[in-house]
Image (tube, grey):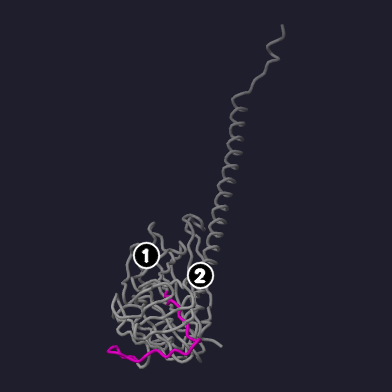
Amino acid sequence: MGSRRGIIGLSLIELMIALLLGTLVIGAAIGIFLANRQTYRTTDSLGRIQENVRTAFELMARDMREAAGNPCSNSVPLVNVVNSAGTRWWTRLDTWGNAARGYGGTEAFADSEFGSGPAERISGTDAIELISTDSNVSTLESHDPAAATMLLNKANHGFVAGDLALVCNPRQASVFQVSSVVGSSIGHGTGGSPGNCTAALGMPLNCGGGATFKYPQPSSVVARLSATRWFIANNPNGRPSLYQTRLTSAGPVSQEVVEGVSSMTFTYLLDGAGSYVDAAAVGSSWPQLKAVRVSMTFIGEPNTGAGGVPLTRTLTQVVSIRNRNP
């Protein structure tokens, strides 16, 4: 039998030193893990912000560049026979010069007040409203003024009753509401909501009757009006987001574009001016608008920045109004 002196275990001091060293190693590993997790969260948040920046600026700039766009010319006389509803967006479209219009942080939309609920514009943030026509253009084959109908060159023109549309040629242009659709034929009679004040689309405007739209074959075309608003509102989760509203004769249809946009400001460059100004300084000079400078502040998820605050980035882009420039 061997001697018991050859069997030696750990002393209490050795055990305590081993536990201390193990604790230090584990603590260091936890610290590295937490640092790596924070770095990952920050990097992921920055990546999301960058993606949101690309999405927000690209989609908004697309609408801005198209403002006042139509298949004819911005310089032809324009008649708007759609019944005025006082505060509705189409009432100011008596010239293509009014196709782009900005709103300062304290100026509400004429038909919509500030609010804090989902899709309600937040007070203190700028907004912009843009009008153009969509890309689906039809050629006017024939026009029957007595029956207030237009025969288009295709049946898949995309119009439905109630749409607001533009018919134009190199001599004149008219904004009206489509009253009926039968195959390739669309109507522009009176009645409906808001309806046309007259079935006569010519100039000068006379809602008691009016002149006949001059139809120079085959240069007249018809396209649907497209109107959008861009603004900041809270989403259903209570986070500020960038919203786009598509305006129709039936009412606005809003959708969230990008989450985490806390503020937005617009400044405007007028023709012949040397500096950008805010919406209040533009006054009634919107027809002279040449470019828009937009700045947005994007916020990341909570605890993604220094000190546990959200990561934020403010970026600026300048957009030329393509249809106002040579």
Q: Return the residue nearer the eye: 141 or 21.
A: 141
* Residue 271 placement, left or right of 196: right
Residue lying furthest bottom:
204
Secondary element under disc 2, as helix, strand or loop, is: helix
Question: Any mark on residue 59, and which?
Answer: 2
* Residue 111 placement, left or right of 226: left
Q: Quadrant of residue 1?
A: top right
Query: Residue 36, how many percent across, how many down?
Result: 58, 49
The image shows residue 232, relative to residue 322, as above or below, that is above
Q: Return the residue nearer the eye: 64 or 43.
A: 64
In this picture, which residue range is highlighted in magenta? 205-227
Question: How many other residues sit within 10 Å of disc 1, few (<14), some (14-19) or many (≥20)?
Answer: many
In the image, what residue occupies the spot 57% across and 41% down?
27
Mostly what secondary structure, the magenta segment?
loop
Secondary element under disc 1, as helix, strand or loop, is: loop
Q: Return the residue nearer the eye: 168 or 22.
A: 168
Q: Quadrant of residue 174?
A: bottom left
Query: Residue 15, how many percent across, how many down?
Result: 60, 27
Question: Any mark on residue 119, and which?
Answer: 1
Q: Quadrant of residue 227?
A: bottom left
Residue 210 sits inside the magenta stretch: yes
Three-letter residue code for mark 1: Ala
Label 1 – label 2 distance at C-alpha: 18 Å
